[in-house]
Image: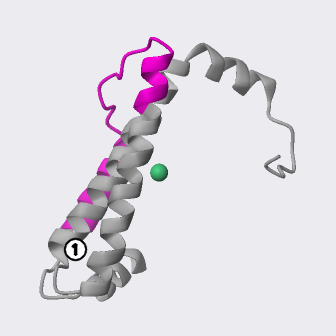
Amino acid sequence: MLGLKLLTDPRWANIAEGNLEEILTDHAWCEQKAASNAISLITNNSEHEDLVHELTAIAIEEMEHFKMVIDIIKERGYTLGRERKDDYVGQLMKFSKKRWQPEYGFYRQTTICCDD
Ligand SMILES: [Fe+2]
């Protein structure tokens, strides 16, 4: 169905099956973070009308995904756990904030962040 080139390693599938509540919780928070990042980009780039329009659609779509995942969590009788901090993402955000200069536009800022 997905056109994968390799079979899924059964060891991974067994681990995932045994931690479904945790995996669904992580998935839910990933959707929420995607929406939050889109909203932050809107806040920091409000002068770019086209960008605001596109990011608004993305934020709404990602929150719809969040709702789909929390509905599955509820259907299975699970509880949405707390957000888990990811050290890699934390370091990446710290790195990009250190280089954030509001006088630069969104596109230039993205280039600067990804150029290092
Ligand atoms: Fe999503």
Label 1 SS: loop
Is 1 drawn above or below residue 78 in the view shown? below
Please report the residue visible at 42 percent of the width from the left and 19 percent of the height from the top.
Answer: 74
> Visible in this render: residue 25?
no
Is 25 drawn above or below residue 91 in the view shown? above
* Magenta-drawn stretch, dominant element (helix, strand or loop): helix
How many dots with numbers?
Answer: 1
- How crowded pointer 1 is (Cα within 10 Å; few <14, some 14-19, many 20+) is rated as few
Question: The magenta stretch spans which residues?
Answer: 70-97
Where residue 14 sits, quadrant-wise, is top right
Q: Is mark 1 within 8 Å of ligand 1?
A: no
> Visible in this render: residue 59?
yes
Please report the residue visible at 38 percent of the width from the left and 63 percent of the height from the top.
Answer: 58
From the viewer's perspective, is 29 left or right of 93?
right
Q: Is residue 76 highlighted in magenta?
A: yes
Three-letter amino acid code of the residue under disc 1: Arg
Where residue 18 sits, quadrant-wise, is top right
Along the viewing direction, whichever of 35 and 86 lies nearer the viewer = 35
Q: Position of residue 5 (x, y in %)?
A: 87, 51
From the viewer's perspective, is 105 left or right of 66?
left
Q: Which residue is mark 1?
A: 99
Q: Position of residue 32 (x, y in %)?
A: 33, 45
Please report the residue visible at 72 percent of the width from the left and 25 percent of the height from the top.
Answer: 13
Q: Is residue 94 highlighted in magenta?
A: yes
Which quarter of the rendering shows the C terminus? bottom left
Q: Position of residue 66 (x, y in %)?
A: 39, 41
